[in-house]
Image: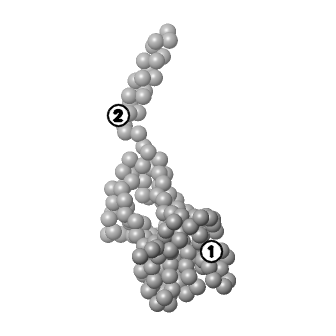
Amino acid sequence: YTSPAGNGSQYSFSSNNWSIGDYYEARLSTLGYSDISISWDQARSSTGPASFELIMSTDGGANFTTLLASYTVLQSGGGGAPGTWSSTTYNPIYSLNQAAAAADNQANVIFRFRSLAGGAATGSNRIDNVFINGTAVPAPGAIALLGVAGLAGLRRRR
């Protein structure tokens, strides 16, 4: 089995037979990180679902909040498509990103890209280049040690 070309990458994750409420999911821990954001590339066939939302849980899936209420997935390839995914050329029109500050320093984060519309049985949707970004937060002890080192440095100069 070969996965279809991604957006400037060799492979993407592709699926069909979409119904309303179906989703792609990413689970991770953001412990020790702040300023969390998520970016991804997404495309569809001419009969694949075009409307999605991005939701997030910080309690392992018991509750979800909406990060992006509705976004449109552009068609890739075929008549009327604004572009085509290629394994060799990245096309930024298929890229999306969203801040997720509520995910800062959480043990059980779930991001779901959930379909708001169904598609034809053969209609496909692809997702690629999913990145969850954040800034490492120094441990409290490291900050205290840095302060002590700064004081020691001042004392040596006198």
Residue type, label 1: Thr
Q: Quadrant of residue 62?
A: bottom left
Query: Is the residue 64 above or below the residue 38 in the image?
Result: below
What residue would you read off at disc 2?
141
Labels in figure, total: 2
Which one is in front, 122 or 60? Answer: 122
What residue would you read off at disc 1?
84
Residue 59 lies left or right of residue 74; in this view the side is left
Q: Which residue lies most toward the front here?
A: 1
SS under mark 1: loop
Which badge, 1 or 2, comes first in the chain's sequence?
1
- Tell me the crowding category of disc 2: few under 14, some 14 to 19, or many 20 or more residues within 10 angstroms, Cα based: few
**Residue appearing at x 46%, y 12% in the figure:** 156
* Alpha carbon distance from label 1 to label 2: 50 Å
**Residue appearing at x 47%, y 47% in the figure:** 135
SS under mark 2: helix
Image location (x, y in percent) of residue 84: 62, 74
Image location (x, y in percent) of residue 118: 48, 87
Which one is in front, 64 or 80? Answer: 80
Residue type, label 2: Gly
- Residue 40 can be seen, yes or no: no
Q: Which residue lies most toward the bottom here?
A: 120
Which callout, 1 or 2, points to the residue nearer the camera?
1
**Residue appearing at x 44%, y 86% in the figure:** 17
Which one is in front, 29 or 85? Answer: 85
Q: Quadrant of the N terminus?
A: bottom left
